[in-house]
C-alpha cells in the first residue's frame, strides 16, 4: 500500500538502514524483490558501511542473496546483435596461420641470405 502511494523506498532509520536492508537482513526475499522492483537502491550503506546484499550474506540468507544477483543480472545491459562480435570462420583462422607461417619463412630466408652475403663479403 505504501509503495502504491509512492512512499520513498530509500528512507533510513537511526542506524542508516533502509527497508531493503532490514528485509535483506531478516531473510524476506519476497519483500526484497518488491522493494527492488519499486526502485530501492541496493548499493546504499548503513552506519557500519554494509549494503543490503552484504547484510543478507552475513546473515546467511542465500535466497535473498540470489534475489539481488537476479536483480543485478536483469539490470545489466545485454549485447544487441549489432554489438555482438561475429565468430571468426575457420577458413580465416587457417588463412591467418598460413600468413604467419609465410612471414616466418620469409624472415628465415632473409636471415639466411644476409648470413650468406656477410660470409661472401668476408671471403
Image (spheres, rainbow, N blue to C red):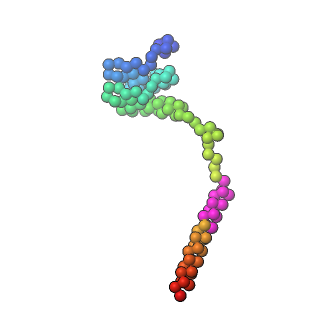
Residue at image location 44% in from the left, 32% down from the top: 65
Name the main secondary structure of what is drawn in magenta.
Answer: helix
Relative to the observer, which residue lies in front, 74 or 58?
74
Whether residue 106 sits left or right of residue 1 in the image: it is right
Q: Residue at x 46, y 30 (%)?
A: 68
Q: Nearer the viewer, residue 92 or 70?
A: 92
Q: Please provide percent x and percent y for residue 24.
A: 41, 26
Number of marks in picture: 0
Nearest the camera: 16 or 26? Answer: 16
Kindly indicate the quadrant of the structure image that contains residue 22. Answer: top left
Residue 66 spot, x, y in % from top left = 47, 32
Q: Residue at the bottom extreme?
A: 123
* Residue 63 seen in the figure: no
Tell me the quarter of the picture where residue 57 sits.
Answer: top left
Residue depicted at 52% across the width and 85% down the height? 122
Whether the magenta-drawn stretch holds residue 40 is answered as: no
Magenta span of residues: 89-102
**Residue 9 seen in the current view:** yes
Question: Which quadrant would residue 16 be assigned to in this image?
Answer: top left
Front-most of residues 84 and 67: 84
Which residue shows up at 49% across the image and 14% down it? 6
| Rendering coords of residue 2 (x, y %) | 47, 13
Identify the residue at the far front of this view: 121
For residue 45, side relative to residue 95 (left or right):
left
| 15 relative to 58, above or below | above
Residue 99 covered by magenta stretch: yes
Query: Picture coordinates of residue 25 (x, y %)?
Result: 38, 26
Amino acid at each position: 500500500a505504501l509503495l502504491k502511494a509512492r512512499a520513498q523506498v530509500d528512507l533510513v532509520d537511526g542506524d542508516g538502514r533502509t527497508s531493503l536492508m532490514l528485509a535483506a537482513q531478516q531473510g524476506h526475499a519476497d519483500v526484497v524483490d518488491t522493494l527492488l522492483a519499486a526502485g530501492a537502491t541496493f548499493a546504499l550503506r548503513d552506519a557500519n558501511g554494509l549494503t543490503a546484499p552484504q547484510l543478507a550474506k552475513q546473515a546467511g540468507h542465500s535466497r535473498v542473496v540470489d534475489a539481488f544477483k537476479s536483480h543485478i543480472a536483469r539490470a545489466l545491459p545485454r549485447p544487441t546483435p549489432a554489438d555482438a562480435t561475429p565468430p571468426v570462420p575457420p577458413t580465416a583462422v587457417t588463412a591467418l596461420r598460413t600468413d604467419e607461417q609465410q612471414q616466418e619463412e620469409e624472415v628465415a630466408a632473409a636471415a639466411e641470405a644476409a648470413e650468406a652475403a656477410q660470409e661472401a663479403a668476408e671471403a
